[in-house]
Image: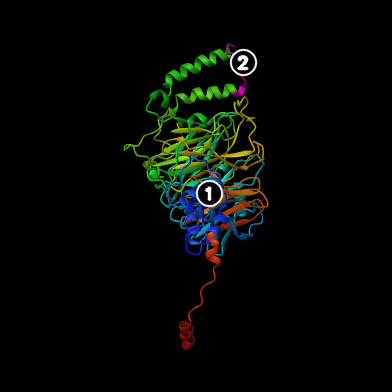
């Protein structure tokens, strides 16, 4: 600008120059004069800066809640919890899982040291209580969850036993007195367990039927097992699900459908043609899809099939495992209870879990609607209300991932399901259920809309895992209003933006990161847990600046007044 105040360069030329600068240089140049300040805040300039800096696809629009491109750039730069502020070393072995209370005031951690620790989440995190589960014959603790009113903590663990043992237990701990209230058997242990209501929790049991066929029973348990009246049920069978090809039900969670119509963030559906995942609606009104053949037809088909096998006319010759699976499928066709519909047609809650139909590695997601009358332990026990021919419960939906599922998490509004999976090779065929296909090192983070039952957009990718499919373990993820985070085996935690599908931060540990969790009240606070036996707290740059800002000194008058009172 010259001495008379007239700009030496037109705004258009200054704009073109600023386009060649980085964000920090643009902001610095804006301090030179009023003209440059105005150009440095131009919306078109910051739109270009945004797409270029964050490498967002140009067809992705601005976040619906954003007021300007400049503010949106600042949000992604300044509000992501990527600054390490505290490291907790109270655990003596690998830390496997973290969970926050709904209020955000407390969180719990589970570890291979066989303790459940409860922490106070203040500006400086401190330990409130440590429960040692070794006296109950536990090998280690693996999962925890607070109930809705934060009065009870569910803690899931693994029993001591042989390497191939699958038995576990769920404990309920009072958060008022830290007393152990009840214990419930849980098999296999990686069912984990979860709350259905404030005082009712879901556990699992497994019954072997054959070499590779079994039945998973999901139980609804009262958290308070010391009920004096013999007429009050403390446990009730919820669902009974057939397992084929050595698969089992694992990783149960409950989604509340009441907020499906008012999500925090509405995501666009992806192109079904480009997705390897397939979603089957088993709760269709089509009777052929729901109920399958009538029992008489199923028995007749089974008789003809067995006749061909016994006479040696089955072509090609079937192995014992294939034969067992086919017999189990035919039996189930006439002995499976179709999905039950709500009288009002309204959704209530979804029970979500991993399962499979081809091999023991979890490669499908089962979804079963829970109706209001099923959410209490009152009523028939052990399924007396079930018809004599209905051995199993049919699922409402099945999502086929075509890969090994290693993690799941729900968005805060419960509408979107995020899934960590390691893909099978394209066109992979499972010939032997005990030998699943090899899995990729790259972890795909898939997103499914539970209202429309469709996959959302493309998979997120940045994190990696290295263990083979027979040793693969669960890596927990978490979702906040704007971000999604996950652990990984590459010694980092990762954070992505849910709207733009971009990776925003890598959080360093010294070993595998098993679990991540956002504060439900403050998404700018994230905790990570690792095999390095530490828990790290991460805050956003904006929060760190606020917490580190010097407090203003009291003015002279108030200093004088305070001294006079002494």
User: Which labelled disc corresponds to residue 317?
Assistant: 2
Q: In which quarter of the image is residue 116?
A: bottom right
Alpha carbon separation for disc pair 1 and 2: 74 Å
Residue furthest to the front in view is 4
Which of 99/331 is in front? 99
Please give left or right for residue 556 compared with residue 134 in the image. left
Please give left or right for residue 357 compared with residue 345 in the image. right
Q: Name the residue under label 1.
A: 16
Report the coloring of the rendering: rainbow
| Boundaries of the magenta span | 312-321
Which of 331/440 is in front? 440
Name the residue rendered at 49%, 53% in the picture: 10
Point out the tag, 1 or 2, that comes first from the N-terminus.
Answer: 1
Q: In this view, does 167 lie above or below 434?
A: below
User: Which labelled disc corresponds to residue 499?
Assistant: none
Q: Is residue 219 above or below residue 338?
A: below
Location of residue 452 in the rendering, given as x and y in whole percent from the top left corner: 42, 36
Q: Helix or strand or loop: what does disc 2 sit on?
A: loop
């Amino acid at each position: 600008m010259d001495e008379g105040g007239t700009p030496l360069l037109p705004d258009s030329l200054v704009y073109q120059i600023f386009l060649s600068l980085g964000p920090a240089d643009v902001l610095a140049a804006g301090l030179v004069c009023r003209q440059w300040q105005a150009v440095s805040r131009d919306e078109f300039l910051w739109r270009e800066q945004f797409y270029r800096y964050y490498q967002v696809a140009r067809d992705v629009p601005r976040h619906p809640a954003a007021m300007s491109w400049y503010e949106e750039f600042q949000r992604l730069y300044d509000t992501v919890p990527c600054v390490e502020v505290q490291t907790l070393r109270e655990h003596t072995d690998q830390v496997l899982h973290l969970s926050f209370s709904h209020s955000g005031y407390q969180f719990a951690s589970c570890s291979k040291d066989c303790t459940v620790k409860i922490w106070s989440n203040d500006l400086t995190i401190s330990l409130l209580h440590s429960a040692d589960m070794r006296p109950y014959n536990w090998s280690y603790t693996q999962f925890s969850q607070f109930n809705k009113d934060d009065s009870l903590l569910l803690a899931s663990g693994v029993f001591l036993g042989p390497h191939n043992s699958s038995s576990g237990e769920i404990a309920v701990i009072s958060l008022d007195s830290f007393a152990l209230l009840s214990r419930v058997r849980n098999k296999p242990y990686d069912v984990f367990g979860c709350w259905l209501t404030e005082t009712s929790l879901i556990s699992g049991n497994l019954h072997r039927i054959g070499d590779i066929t079994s039945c998973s029973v999901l139980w609804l348990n009262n958290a308070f097992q010391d009920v004096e009246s013999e007429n009050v049920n403390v446990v009730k069978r919820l669902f009974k699900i057939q397992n084929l090809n050595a698969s089992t039900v694992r990783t149960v969670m409950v989604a509340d459908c009441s907020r499906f119509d008012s999500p925090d963030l509405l995501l666009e559906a992806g192109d079904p043609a480009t997705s390897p995942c397939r979603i089957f609606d088993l709760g269709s009104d089509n009777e052929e899809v729901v109920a399958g053949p009538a029992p008489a037809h199923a028995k007749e088909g089974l008789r003809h099939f067995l006749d061909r096998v016994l006479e040696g006319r089955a072509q090609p010759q079937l192995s014992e495992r294939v034969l067992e699976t086919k017999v189990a499928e035919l039996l189930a066709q006439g002995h499976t209870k179709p999905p039950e519909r709500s009288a009002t047609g309204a959704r209530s809650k979804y029970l979500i879990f991993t399962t499979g139909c081809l091999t023991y590695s979890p490669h499908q997601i089962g979804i079963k609607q829970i109706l209001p009358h099923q959410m209490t332990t009152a009523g028939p026990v052990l399924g007396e209300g079930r018809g004599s021919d209905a051995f199993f419960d049919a699922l409402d939906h099945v999502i086929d991932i075509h890969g090994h599922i290693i993690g799941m998490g729900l968005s805060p509004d419960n509408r979107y399901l995020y899934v960590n999976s390691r893909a099978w090779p394209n066109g992979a065929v499972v010939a032997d259920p005990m030998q699943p296909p090899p899995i990729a090192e790259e972890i795909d983070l898939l997103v499914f809309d539970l209202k429309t039952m469709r996959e959302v957009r493309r998979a997120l990718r940045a994190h990696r895992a290295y263990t083979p499919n027979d040793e693969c373990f669960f890596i927990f993820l978490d979702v906040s209003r704007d971000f999604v985070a996950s652990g990984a085996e590459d010694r980092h935690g990762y954070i992505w933006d849910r709207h733009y599908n971009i990776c925003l931060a890598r959080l360093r540990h010294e070993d595998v990161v098993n679990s991540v969790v956002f504060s439900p009240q403050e998404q700018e606070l994230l905790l990570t847990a690792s095999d390095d036996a530490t828990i790290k707290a991460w805050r956003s740059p904006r929060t760190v600046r606020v917490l580190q800002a010097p407090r203003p000194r009291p003015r002279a008058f108030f200093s004088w007044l305070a001294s006079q009172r002494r």
